[in-house]
Amino acid sequence: MSRERPRIGDVARIAGVSTATVSRALSNPALVSAETRAAVMDAVEATGYRLNQAARNLRHRRTGAIVALVPNLANPFFSQILSGIASVLGPAGYNLLIVDTWTAGADRLRDCAEPSLADGLIVLDGTLPAEIVTGRLPVVEACEWINGLAAPRVKIDNRAAAGLAIDHLVDLGHRRIGHVAGPPESVLSVARLAGVRDRLAMRGLSLAEDALYAGDFSLDSGRRAALSWIAQPADLRPTGLFLASDAMACGFMAEVQRHGIRVPEQVSIIGFDDIELVSHVSPPLTTIRQPRTALGRMAAERLLHQLGGAEEAESDTILPVELVIRSSATVFAG
């Protein structure tokens, strides 16, 4: 005899909550407490209960999908953010669809914002035109943001975060400090460069024109910045550098080491993001840690609030960052 399929009432009984609470915990977990959500998920696992998602989606006239618009999926920075998003959307019954904005054309991106394809958007690319993602679906911006787009944002204070890196270099005794910026069209690059200039001014210093190097967040642009740094007279080179991404910091460090320059004895280097790689390079990279998993989770929760009918203010959720001190920056001995 086949075993009777578990019902939502079985889950409610084991979790010690009402069936309505079980429904909320599974369809919109942001609306229940973490304790209740955990109790429901434990009961779901114990009973083997499974939602009939196809029927549920049809009944609620939804697709059951959320689209994340991500610039450059080859960039390892986004992995933890996407994992955080999926950890919230999955239990709520949503599939996460990921679109690389660097390879998708404008028509494809507009299609992603159609209600026939998705129920909501999480936008991680601040270079997109606002009109592509405006008006048709609930939207949350994560990490990056589009100027002029009226949507909730989950991010860090990039300006203040850059200041942490500059403070560390100044406290180590560096006075000629350089910066490798990201692409000029990026809101992150603009904010981090502003943070560099602000904090240097607060410490009685300034960013020299020949101490600002162009980059695009990639390994190779870090390598090219290192070649520019090496080409400068040794007594005019910045002794400490803050790079706007870990990838650029790794590329910079590898190139100067290839030329026989020791890190941190001859140049101190600080990155940004704390991607998984940087604790394993030699020397391990000092960097600014972004709470990437938390960024993804919070973005997904704010979107679920909208999908559940809650009013979402067009406000910023600012998550804290941390300076992670490793071995790539040291006291200036010059």
Image: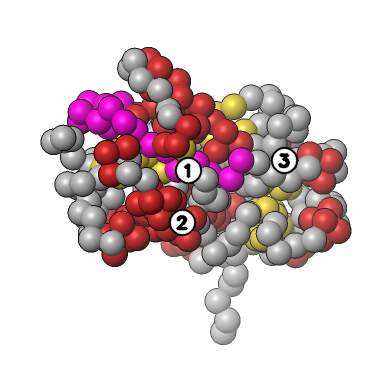
Q: Answer yes or no: do the residues labelled 2 and 1 have beta carbons within 8 Å?
A: no
Q: How many marks?
A: 3
Q: Amino acid at mark 3?
A: Val
x and y percentages locating residue 163 in the rendered image: 39, 27
Q: Answer yes or no: do the residues labelled 3 and 2 have beta carbons within 8 Å?
A: no
| Residue 73 belongs to the span the image colors magenta | no
Foreground tag (1 vs 3): 1
Q: Who is closer to the viewer here, 2 or 242?
A: 242
Distance of label 2 from label 1 (alpha carbons): 9 Å
Q: Who is closer to the viewer here, 102 or 50?
A: 102
Residues packed near mark 2 inside 10 Å, few (<14), some (14 to 19) or many (20 plus): some
Q: Label 3: which residue?
A: 139
Quadrant in which the N terminus is drawn: bottom right
* Magenta segment boundaries in residue numbering: 167-184
Q: Amino acid at mark 1?
A: Tyr
x and y percentages locating residue 190 in the rendered image: 57, 33
Q: Label 2: which residue?
A: 224
Q: Label 1: which residue?
A: 213
Task: Decide: is 236 above or below 260.
Answer: above
Q: Amino acid at mark 2?
A: Arg
Q: Which residue: 82% across, 56% down?
A: 106
x and y percentages locating residue 63 in the rendered image: 78, 58
Q: Which residue: 37% across, 45% down?
A: 232
Distance of label 1 from label 3 (alpha carbons): 34 Å
Does residue 17 appear anywhere in the picture?
Answer: no
Task: Decide: is 62 above or below 271.
Answer: below
Residue 2's image quarter? bottom right
User: Which is nearer the N-term, disc 1 or disc 3?
Assistant: 3
Q: Who is closer to the viewer here, 62 or 135?
A: 135
| Residue 177 belongs to the span the image colors magenta | yes
